[in-house]
Image (cartoon, grey):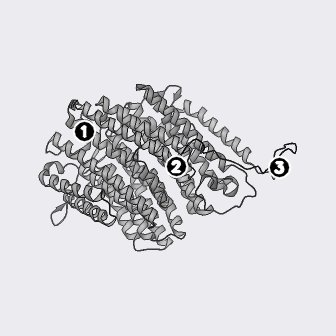
Amino acid sequence: MEAYEIAVWVLIALPVLMGALALLFKKKTPLLAIVAVNSIIVILLSIYLILALQANNIGQGQYLKIGAEGVIAGGLTVHQLIMYLDWALLFIFIVLGIYIRSWVVLPLALVQLVAIVWFEQNNGAAVEANAFALDYLSLVFVLICSIVGSLIALYGVQYMSEGEHNQGRFFFFILAFLGVMNGAVLSDNMIFLYFFWEATTLCCYFLIAHEGDKVSLANAKWAAEVTVAGGAALLLGILMFANVFGNNEESLSIMSLVERTDLPVASVFVAMPIFFVSLSGFTKSAQVPFQSWLLGAMVAPTPVSALLHSSTMVKLGVYVIIRMSPVIVQFDWLMLVIAFVGAYSFVSTALLAIQERSMKRLLAFSTVGNLGLIIMLAAIGTREAVAAAIVLTIFHAVSKALLFLSAGTVQKIFERKDIEGSEGLFRRAPALFGAFMVGIFTMFLTPFGVFIAKYAALTEAIINPVLIMMLVVGSIACEVFYVRWLGRTMAVTGEPVKKEVPSLYTGPMWTLGIGAVVLAAMLPLYYSGLLDHIVGFNHLDVTFPYISLDYTGFIPSAMIFIGLLFILYYAMRDDGGKKVEPYTGGMYDYKVELSCPYFEQYTKATKNMLYAEILGVVVLIVAFIGALVAGGVF
């Protein structure tokens, strides 16, 4: 077995095993040691895999195969092990469906169990496809999961030590989540992908339900129902692919599928599995109308929120669509409707976020929107669009993790969940404010990758004027709620009550913040380096209109950013000045207070959410009909 094959297996198995070890402990010190050891190993292995790809001269369209022919024990092969684990996992969902009284989870799990058992017993050759495949795209997601996920787990040790319960069980699911996420993005065999896909759903349920109260259990139940339905859609798509391509080792190989350029685009049997796999990605990435499960997940502890939004779960949804992009673009109508699903999610959640008071829910809306933008870019499928989708994925993971950890720290230390709870943060907790400010800036300012990706989205959305309009409206709304929130943190509201922020909070946050800045500085390097190997730029610098992605374009943007930092520094200096009320000539006697407009007089949040979901359903129906049209049914 090659060294890189061992590294892949360790990246999947080690977090699960370390999580099992965490079950034995309840105290902060041993849990910190377990999380730290796991973090160091998986990060080093992830970096090693970059070297392995380079040593093997892996370029665009190439990958390293990781087989599963070996026998574990007693004649049991790896393929058989995954098969039995599939059955066991679905049996757990059946029991869970009965326990939580879900008439969605129970029947769907039963149907999936019957289908997978029948398929695996009657399609042996197909099931014996390669286990895993390592290329630069899968490695991007492994790095996100291993580095960002590990930093969140380290943050979680301090967070959970402050009065939280069942810490061992909590870290079992956190660490296992990282392992199964790595397994999912590295899978070449669709059956392997399906197993890890459903395993992330199980981890997600128990993490959302961690507090054990009525609200947490209700939201965990809804998350399970939506994502198990997505798993059923994925399995249906897999079975349809196997039916189209026959009972052979390549019929369930993801890499073999995306390499094909001769797909019968007039066949409904090809268009429909693409739609169902994309639908499963929509549920996992919480695209409208499925966004409510992710919003409900905000009741979970902050490390869970950060993990779900940045490095696991929702990122798996966009990974599948990015991976399937070469197939999607072969179906013009299907490509366009999938792009509209993403664009609609982006604009609708951006507008809903404007009226949101809760910090974590606002960030959740923002996550859904940015994931929608990634999906839109992946569906468009040009080299520039896919490159922008990957850049947005990387920067969103880092910046959104930083913002969630910042919001969670404000909630933990200052006991406020709403945006007003961050007022005057630059005076009350300067280190926390600094990390938060970097998170905000990197989400919408140049020279950071989110800005670059949004600009690229505008240039690539030229295929349809409606897409451009949706992107413009959504981007403006994003600027509104981020600038408004940043303004609250710089507000001066009486005498500040300063509090110490533990280093296990600020350490991971500042690591993420510095990482975001370093990633921006390195963007010209890996845009023409790393992304060459994914989308094939032939080592040429890619230039979008008015933006050069080399250092001639980066340096002026960086200077603007640095200048803005100096302006903010002088604006926030506390020189002992005294706050005075505005002069009104004695005509009025009133107390001046800050205000933060949420447009309550114009909007009803619940009603607007319902309208967004109804329209989202309409968009999905159009997508389904589009798949039938692409398949020649009509």
Q: Quadrant of residue 248?
A: top left
Question: Can residue 535 be seen by looking at this rendering?
Answer: no
- According to the picture, the residue beneath numbered tag 1 turns out to be 272
Tag in front: 2 or 3: 3
| Nearest to N terminus: mark 2 or mark 3 | 2
Quadrant of the drawing holding the C terminus: top left
- According to the picture, the residue beneath numbered tag 3 turns out to be 589
Across and down, in percent, residue 437 comes to 61, 48
| Nearest to N terminus: mark 2 or mark 1 | 1
Q: Quadrant of residue 412?
A: bottom right
Question: Can residue 619 be seen by looking at this rendering?
Answer: yes
Crowd around label 2: few <14 · some 14–19 · many ≥20 (10 Å):
many
Q: Depth check: 475 or 147 in front? A: 475
- According to the picture, the residue beneath numbered tag 2 turns out to be 363
Indicate the amino acid at tag 3: Asp
Q: Residue at x 75, y 56 (%)?
A: 494
Indicate the amino acid at tag 1: Met
Q: Depth check: 496 or 215 in front? A: 215
Q: Secondary structure at mark 1?
A: helix
Rendered view: 476 above or below 83: above
Across and down, in percent, residue 71 comes to 18, 61
Crowd around label 3: few <14 · some 14–19 · many ≥20 (10 Å):
few
Q: In the shown orientation, is residue 90 left or right of residue 448?
A: left
Quadrant of the drawing holding the N terminus: bottom left
Q: Secondary structure at mark 2?
A: helix
Report, in whole angstroms, how far the alpha carbon at label 2 lies from the one at label 3.
Answer: 38 Å
Indicate the amino acid at tag 2: Leu
Q: Residue at x 41, y 61 (%)?
A: 218
Across and down, in percent, residue 614 comes to 40, 42
| Nearest to N terminus: mark 1 or mark 3 | 1
Report, in whole angstroms, how far the alpha carbon at label 1 lies from the one at label 3.
Answer: 68 Å
Q: Residue furthest right?
A: 585
